[in-house]
């Protein structure tokens, strides 16, 4: 498939929209859990966290469909084959773990705990599995550890994007920024 110098407009909207939701959900998740008495006494942040984050389960379907049917920019020739492979593996991890695995693990946790999930606060997500309190600690552990792992993954992703722009001075970040269509 032909390569262009920039992501398509829709790919940029999906990337930045989902990045905003994802980072917002991550911060709200931390505040909800670790500053429970201060900010989450009536589970309002837990509701917000689930309402925001559950939209990722729907947006990712659109994003992957778009990704598979549209060209993406070629990586700069200055990158070694090893770096290119690293970029590919990093992106696959972001899709598989941060954008699919993590929201699925939150949905699984809420399902075993028999707690409702209101997508965008608008409609209820059906349970993924039957409630089972004996799986509560396992589900909580999976979501919590995956959330921290993904925090590191996304932090690394942002640092690499900034390195491309400010140190390597190549087109990788500008290809994802608004305003340049090719
Ligand atoms: C974008 C996807 C998501 C991200 C980035 C994310 C991130 C987080 C983080 C960082 C925490 C705090 C972990 C800790 O240190 O204890 C958390 C907690 C939590 N997450 Fe998620 N999560 C996501 C998706 C979901 C989904 C889809 C659900 C449910 C449908 C969910 C349910 C929960 C619940 C119930 C908590 C505990 C909140 C509390 O104890 O009040 N998460 N999440
Ligand atoms: C300030 C935050 C962010 C910056 C500066 C940023 C920057 C970028 C850049 C420059 C690219 C293009 C890389 C390339 O062409 O090789 C990219 C791709 C990507 N980003 Fe981000 N990103 C951010 C946040 C996020 C977040 C929060 C996620 C998901 C949790 C994410 C997931 C992805 C994925 C999956 C790709 C690969 C796109 C593809 O080729 O299909 N990004 N990002």
Image: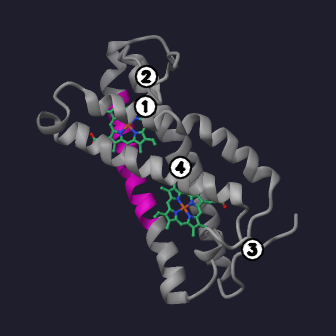
Dot 4: element: helix
Which stretch is magenta? 139-156
Residue 125, position in %: x, y?
Answer: 51, 20
Is there CB contact under 8 Å for labels 1 and 3? no
For mark 4, does the 10 Å Cα neighbourhood hold few (<14), some (14 to 19), or many (20 or more) residues?
some
Which residue was labeled with disc 1?
51
Q: Residue at x 16, y 41 (%)?
A: 35
Which residue was labeled with disc 3?
74
Task: Work out whether residue 26 or residue 132 is closer to the camera in this orientation and state it.
Answer: 26
Task: Measure how far apart labels 1 and 3 are at the Cα level.
Answer: 36 Å
- The mark that comes first in sequence, 1 or 3, is 1
Q: Residue furthest left?
A: 37
- The mark that comes first in sequence, 1 or 4, is 4
Which residue was labeled with disc 2?
117
Dot 3: element: loop
Q: Disc 4 beta carbon < 8 A from ligand 2?
A: yes
Q: Disc 2 beta carbon < 8 A from ligand 1?
A: yes
Q: Which residue is drawn at 67% across and 39% down?
A: 61
Task: Measure how far apart labels 3 and 4 are at the Cα level.
Answer: 22 Å
Q: Quadrant of ligand 2?
A: bottom right
């Amino acid at each position: 498939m032909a390569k262009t110098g920039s992501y398509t407009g829709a790919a940029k909207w999906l990337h930045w929209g989902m990045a905003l939701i994802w980072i917002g959900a991550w911060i709200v998740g931390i505040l909800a859990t670790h500053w429970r008495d201060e900010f989450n006494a009536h589970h309002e942040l837990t509701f917000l966290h689930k309402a925001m984050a559950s939209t990722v389960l729907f947006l990712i379907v659109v994003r992957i469909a778009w990704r598979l049917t549209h060209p993406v920019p070629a990586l700069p020739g200055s990158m070694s084959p090893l770096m290119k492979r690293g970029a590919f593996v990093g992106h696959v991890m972001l899709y598989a773990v941060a954008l699919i695995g993590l929201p699925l693990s939150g949905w699984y946790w809420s399902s075993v705990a028999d707690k409702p999930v209101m997508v965008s606060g608008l409609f209820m997500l059906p349970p993924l599995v039957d409630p089972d309190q004996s799986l509560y600690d396992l589900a909580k552990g999976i979501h919590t550890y995956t959330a921290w792992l993904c925090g590191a993954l996304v932090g690394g992703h942002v640092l690499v994007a900034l390195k491309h722009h400010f140190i390597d001075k190549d087109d990788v970040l500008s290809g994802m920024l608004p305003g340049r269509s090719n």
